[in-house]
Amino acid sequence: MLKTLRNALKIEEIRDRLKYTFLMLIIIRLGSLLPLPGVNRDFMASFFNSMAGSGEAFNFFNAFTGGSFEQMSIFALSISPYITSSIIMQLLTIAIPKLEEMQKDGEEGKKKIQKLTRYVTVALALIEALAMAIGFGQQGLIYDYGFVSVTIVVAALTAGSAFLMWLGERITEKGVGNGISIILMVNIVSRIPIDFMNLYEKFISGQKIPMAALAIGIIAIVILLTVVLVLTLNGGERKIPVQYAKKMQGRKMVGGQSTHIPLKVNTSGVIPIIFTSSIMSFPSVIAAFLGKDIEAGTTFGYRVMRVLNQQNWFNMNHPKRTIGLLIYIILVVFFAYFYTSITFNPIEVADNMKKQGGFIPGIRPGKPTTEHLTRILNYIIFIGATGLIIVAIIPIFFNGVFGAMVSFGGTSIIIIVGVILETMKQVESLMLVRYYKGFLND
């Protein structure tokens, strides 16, 4: 990877793209420090400290915003509305035939869907900004709470999210990698120094040398193990061999080549984790907007919210709350199968293979091929979901047992590793294109 980067820096075009990407990321991080007008920036800090139960529901979101949410900057919503919008549009593409036609309509159709995604992003940002300004504003976030101050905060939050979306698209166009993914990765990475400082103060500072050394060793092993698991999960794939029959085309015999269909083990990425975490934290988010502390509540609803709260799992003082982990596992597996089913269609793949004269050795074209692909897909989805659950549970376990609260958990590491690998692949492809151009010009 380092060798690829060194070679890339020797090429002026790629070097300019990297400079542009770096400049945009500096702008993003500077924007994360700009406070919203008329807000009490100390409110969120006290909220996270005082409302452990409800505040926990926002930790996942805060990590994705690079701490902008806790600081209440103009980028407090970050690119979360865009990510949600993209997922919604993907789901609607399956449900609405007109959108499905757009998706199949080549580059022009993709541009139309992208335009709709932008509109949905702004609408979601507006809704989230309203909920945040009204819900937290009544509790003390906004100094002079009223129509004008709420309008200013909502406008600033919506504009900040829309601006980040625009910057992400510019990075994709003029920089290196997928801009939205890179912004998300940088936000997550920006929180890592703070997390290491928290780990140092909790487990190392003030300890005797043997205990401090043991703590450092355990932390290093856990992080290394998580990264290795993520790399294995991200790189694992099942290659299904495909053979194309020979046929006459004019006076020439074409076809006869062998290829394969690559099926990634983790076909759905981190989407199942994001969906599951969002659904399970939703009741706590509503409670937080209403100013309720779920740890102090005694009704059945409060008990359910405590069970759904990840911070309470593996807590030896409240072992019954770990039952929420079972719900978590079921939802992750469900969303892994659900999301893969809308992104990979075995019937469509089998039909396309049949039309092009392709077949899987030992499997008849048509329905038998569809059944074979479905069987393999169900098998690898389960393996991928299991790996995803293991990676996600590691930080939850150490948080529950030892109180090691960090934002660079399994989900964050999956995103970081995935974005880095995809970005390096694009750099390599840019280098390859330049090589071919140079070869042709010579």
Image (cartoon, grey):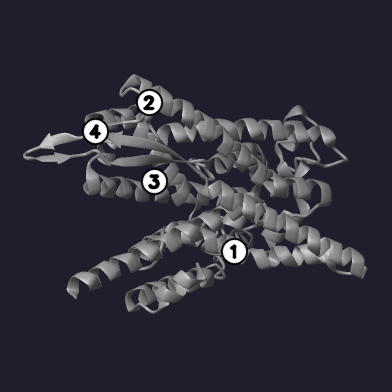
Q: CA distance from mark 1 to mark 4?
A: 49 Å
Q: CA distance from mark 1 to mark 3?
A: 27 Å
* Circle 3: residue type: Val
Say which residue label 1 marks.
189
In-image side of 164 versus 194 (left or right): left
Q: CA distance from mark 2 to mark 1?
A: 48 Å
In terms of sequence position, does the residue under pointer 4 or pointer 3 come before the other? 3
Say which residue label 2 marks.
362
In the picture, the disc for residue 245 is 4
In terms of sequence position, does the residue under pointer 1 or pointer 3 come before the other? 3
Q: CA distance from mark 3 to mark 2?
A: 46 Å
Task: Sort mark 4 into few (<14), some (14-19) or many (20+) by Cα contacts within 10 Å.
Answer: some
Element type at mark 2:
loop
In terms of sequence position, does the residue under pointer 1 or pointer 4 come before the other? 1
Residue 378 coordinates in the image, percent (x, y): 50, 29
- Residue at 56% x, 39% y: name it: 384
Check the image and report above or below for 353 versus 295: above
* Circle 4: residue type: Ala
Check the image and report above or below for 127 versus 92: below
In-image side of 111 versus 276 (left or right): left
Circles 1 and 4 in contact, beta carbons < 8 Å: no
Q: Nearer the viewer, mark 4 or mark 3?
A: 4
Say which residue label 3 marks.
120
* Circle 2: residue type: Gly
